[in-house]
Image (cartoon, rainbow, N blue to C red):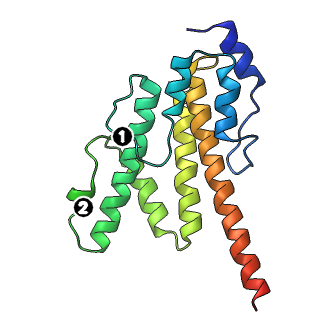
């Protein structure tokens, strides 16, 4: 359902670009949204997560469910790859939800082969970003758009924390040499 509140809210949000700094925090995003959309919709946005820990509560919003299925499938693929290199059975580490997709297998293999852990993580988050872009198709001024926006904002926040930690580590190395 498209309402004037969604149109106004979404048209005022800054565009997000992978690799850029987040324009504001996820918490600030929720505060902004709370002025324009219902408490029920805010609760749905609070379900946004990029941690892989989704709990047992099944989402009723298809965009949220599709995101979780993609992310879980990607995490399952990484478990399979890592377990095979350690000659372990991955079954006890796999999550039952998710989707099977050869493209996801390809993403996981490419990330695993990258010698830089940081670059591998960037590849994975870039793939997540692209998956979110696909979920956003045909959603312009609705809750689904905000769900995608929330997840992208969480990815940007994650990279802001990673880069701050990396800068701190580099600075410590330079100071203590």
Identify the disc placed on residue 35. Answer: none
Front disc: 1 or 2: 1
Where is mark 2, residue-wise? 90
- Residue 102: x and y in percent read 36, 48
Where 5 sits versus 110, above or below? above
- Residue 169: x and y in percent read 69, 75
Is 40 or 166 nearer to us in this picture? 40
Where is mark 1, residue-wise? 55
| Kind of element beneath mark 1 | loop
**Mark closest to the chain's N terminus, 1 or 2:** 1
Is 152 or 49 nearer to us in this picture? 49
- Residue 145: x and y in percent read 59, 25
Residue at mark 1 to residue at mark 2: CA–CA distance: 21 Å
Q: Does residue 148 appear anywhere in the picture?
A: yes
Location of the C terminus (image quadrant): bottom right
Q: Residue at x 55, y 29 (%)?
A: 147
């Amino acid at each position: 359902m498209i309402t004037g509140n969604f149109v106004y809210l979404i048209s005022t949000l800054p565009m997000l670009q992978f690799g850029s700094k987040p324009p504001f925090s996820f918490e600030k995003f929720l505060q902004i949204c709370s002025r324009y959309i219902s408490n029920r919709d805010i609760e749905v946005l609070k379900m946004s997560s990029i941690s892989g820990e989704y709990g047992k509560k099944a989402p009723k919003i298809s965009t949220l469910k599709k995101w979780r299925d993609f992310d879980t499938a990607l995490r399952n693929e990484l478990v399979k790859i890592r377990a095979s290199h350690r000659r372990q059975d991955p079954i006890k580490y796999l999550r039952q939800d998710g989707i099977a997709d050869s493209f996801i297998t390809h993403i996981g293999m490419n990330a695993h082969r990258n010698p830089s852990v940081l670059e591998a993580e960037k590849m994975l988050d870039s793939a997540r970003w692209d998956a979110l872009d696909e979920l956003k198709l045909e959603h312009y001024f609705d809750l689904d758009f905000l769900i995608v926006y929330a997840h992208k904002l969480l990815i940007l926040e994650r990279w802001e924390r990673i880069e701050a930690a990396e800068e701190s580590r580099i600075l410590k190395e330079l100071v203590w040499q």
